[in-house]
Amino acid sequence: MSAADGPNGTGASAAPDYEWRYEYYDDEEPVSFEGLRAHRYSIVISFWVGLAVFVIFMFFLLVLLTKTGAPHPDGTGQPCETRPRLIGYRDTDLNNGAPPRPSGLDSCSLSWCCVSKEVSSRAPCSIAGGVGEGGRHRRPSSSLEMGDATLLQELAVTDNGMENEAILLAHFNIPNCVNSEHSSTVGEDDLLLGEPELPIILEGRDRSGRNRNDFTSAWRAESSYSSNVITQRISEDSTGFIVTQLGLGVNDYFLNH
Amino acid sequence: MNANPVNQSDCPEVKVPVPLFLAIGVVSLAENLLVVVAIIWNRNLHSPMYCFICSLAAFNTIASLSKTWETLMIVFADVGQLEKTGSSVMKLDDVMDSLLCMSFVGSIFSFLAIAVDRYITIFHALRYHNVMTMRRTGAMLGIIWTTCGVVAVLMVRFFDSKFIMICFVAFFIISLAIICSLYVYMFMLARIHARKIAALPTSSGGRSRQQRWRGNSMRGALTLTILFGAIVVCWAPFFVHLIIIMVCPMNPYCECYRSLFQLHVVLLMSHSVVDPAIYAFRIAELRHTFRKMLLCSQWRRCS
């Protein structure tokens, strides 16, 4: 920027004599350099050292946040049914024009069940896949199976929806009936460092078969939206583990059905 | 610290060679223009998240354009082709400063908007499509651009006043705090979920799962550090410069910091170069669009 204001910032240089240089200060400025006790660039050095320390500290803090929650095998989850549950939708290949169709909902593609223990004491642990402007018409039965191992319902997206989804989500105790989908284009580079994605769509249904149809139709209704859809991608590596890829943001991910 | 008295030589101003300015400006312009064109061209990318990224790229484009233009004008002025004190030249200088201010403020607003959008995506996932409609996105972008334009004009008009600078610095610090807290909160939730999933007992042993979980966590921490660290490292020196101008104009130590002004401006411009790599190029859909745009020999035939 061209330097137009004086060094003392009081607006003394109101005269319109712009200097077309990057010098910010006049040469007549009487800054005395006598008797400096510290190095001339001490402010510069201390600023950059402070900045580096801050960034490194932030990095280690984040790593510490991850390490303090080391996973341990937890067998307290009740076995839940491996019914098909829709967790996300395919939003890639929108270039292809046709929205993805849920083809394998009958297979146990993704199961993500909540144990009722944790949740029964709370308001309905509700999660839904049916999100969208047209979501209001999708309103299947939404009762929490209290004594049940599975907890699911489809939440209608209304303004009366769950206000504390994040709290509920944070309290889910995920049982052991998780399958995964082969997501063929999932790669290591698509983790947090790569694609931003979303960790959250927990979805469930109760045991009635009717809800399966509801899900299917909701899934289809949702997949017709061309905008970004919130998905959760669960990929399985060759050894059969389940890796959830979490990220920041919404992006195009898919589930193979 | 060294107790010997320093010579009377002041801190000479560190000058950055003009080709470096031009190179950074041109690269930044090319990248961000590519992002803007790709997002506008591909109809699949007309969604709130991409709109905010496009807005960020547009602000960076304006910044690099005006900076490059100003550098060229200074080069011409030094050579003698341009009269330094002509009124039209001064008005042009004002316009370019306004554009620069507008793009700085707009970049910060765009970072905020992207962070809020991602936050709503994660924490209000089920209502995302109701909360973040295209109409609201358009309204938000309209407000952001209007505010930036107004603020830019005000800042250049009243740059002498300390109040404007204080507002600018305060705005930057508050935005940075909001962005940092949003991302850390999102990161923590993501980690909780990853931990829960990794804690699932499966048939196979848990050891490599734990390693995979740790690997993911490290990547998440690295992503967040890069994202936030780039903002801080590139923007903070310039803002500390502004603070120092207001606080200690006559101090020799502050003078030595101020002598690095051009370096700080270069850092600011280099953030425009790094931004697409952090936000836009990570998105697979955008990369596909770039490949189609750049490698497609015949435009009409590309789908």
Image (cartoon, rainbow, N blue to C red):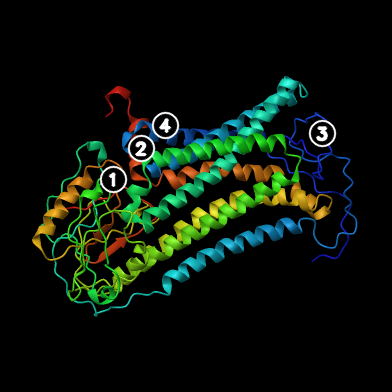
Label 4: which residue? B37
Image quarter for residue A202? Answer: bottom left
Q: Secondary structure at mark 3?
A: loop
Residue picked out by circle 2: B46
The chain under label 1 reads: A
Q: Amino acid at mark 3?
A: Ala
- What residue is at 82 percent from the left and 43 percent from the top? A10
- Residue B163 lies left or right of residue A33; in this view the side is left
Would you name the residue on which mark 3 appears?
A14
Cα–Cα span, label 1 and label 3: 56 Å
Q: Do labels 1 and 4 touch, CB within 8 Å? A: no
**Relative side of B118 to B200, left or right:** right
For the C terminus of chain B, the quadrant is top left
Q: Residues within 10 Å of mark 3 (few under 14, many from 20)?
A: few
Chain under label 2? B
Q: Are marks 1 and 3 on the same chain?
A: yes
Front disc: 2 or 1: 1
How would you rate the neighbour count of disc 4 (Cα within 10 Å): few for under 14, some for 14-19, many for 20 or more? some
- Image quarter where the N terminus of chain B lies is bottom right
Amino acid found under the numbered disc labelled 2 = His
User: In the visual, does A46 lie left or right of A6?
Assistant: left
Residue A33 coordinates in the image, percent (x, y): 88, 53
Query: Residue B20: in sight, yes or no?
Result: no
- Label 3 marks a residue whose chain is A
Give the label on residue A133, or none: 1
Of callouts 1 and 3, the N-terminal one: 3
Do the residues at discs 2 and 4 belong to one chain? yes
Can the viewer see residue B143 in this picture?
yes
